[in-house]
Image (spheres, rainbow, N blue to C red):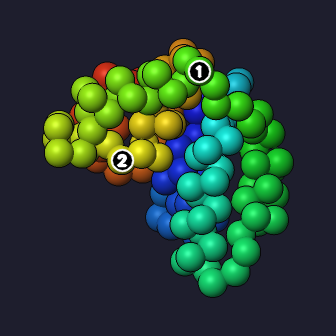
Amino acid sequence: MILDSSALLAIALDEPEREAFVARINAAEVVAVAAPTLVEAGIVLSARTGEDAGELLAELVAASDAVVIEFGAGHWQEAVSAWWRFGRSRHPAALNLGDCLAYATAKLANEPLLAKGNDFPQTDIALA
């Protein structure tokens, strides 16, 4: 499974989905997250907590045994394609930049995406 920033934030901020997401992560054979997704999650988490969230996010990644996936040539092309098909102002899913990065990572890894919200269910990506 690939982690979206929304799932990471739900866990880190103890949102109502936290326990369900932790259970899904613990049950998964593969857990991974794209490096740019960690940047997005780290920025949002830092803004919400008023602290440098890098260490907290690193602990969360380590606790989930998530592999950090580098974002390469195939990823950017898939992310642009995701925006073209499902992007904000183009489709009801209204994927933003961070969403497109997570979508591309899940698509190329052929893994389901763990995410919160109503955006990804409106795309063709498999959900965890």
* Front disc: 2 or 1: 1
Q: Residue at x 76, y 64 (%)?
A: 54
Residue 126 falls left or right of residue 67: left
Residue type at tag 2:
Asn
Q: Are marks 2 and 1 in contact (CB under 8 Å)?
A: no
Residue 77 falls left or right of residue 105: left
* Mark linked to residue 112: none
Above or below, 105 relative to 38: above
Residue type at tag 1:
Ala
Query: Which quarter of the rendered picture does the N terminus lie within?
Result: top right
Q: Residue at x 64, y 31 (%)?
A: 71
Task: State whether residue 25 appears in this view.
Answer: no
Q: Secondary structure at mark 1?
A: helix
Residue 82 falls left or right of residue 41: left
Q: Quadrant of residue 67?
A: top right
Which percent across, then down, holds residue 104? 48, 27
Task: State whether residue 12 appears in this view.
Answer: yes
Which percent across, then down, holds residue 52? 73, 74
* Mark linked to residue 73: 1
Q: Residue lying farthest bottom? A: 50
| Near-viewer residue (19 or 74) | 74
Q: Residue at x 81, y 58 (%)?
A: 59
Which percent across, then down, holds residue 15? 51, 67
Structural distance between the alpha carbons of marks 2 and 1: 19 Å
Of the numbered discs 2 and 1, the one sitting upstream in the chain is 1
* Mark linked to residue 96: 2
Q: Quadrant of residue 43?
A: bottom right
Q: Residue at x 68, y 41 (%)?
A: 35
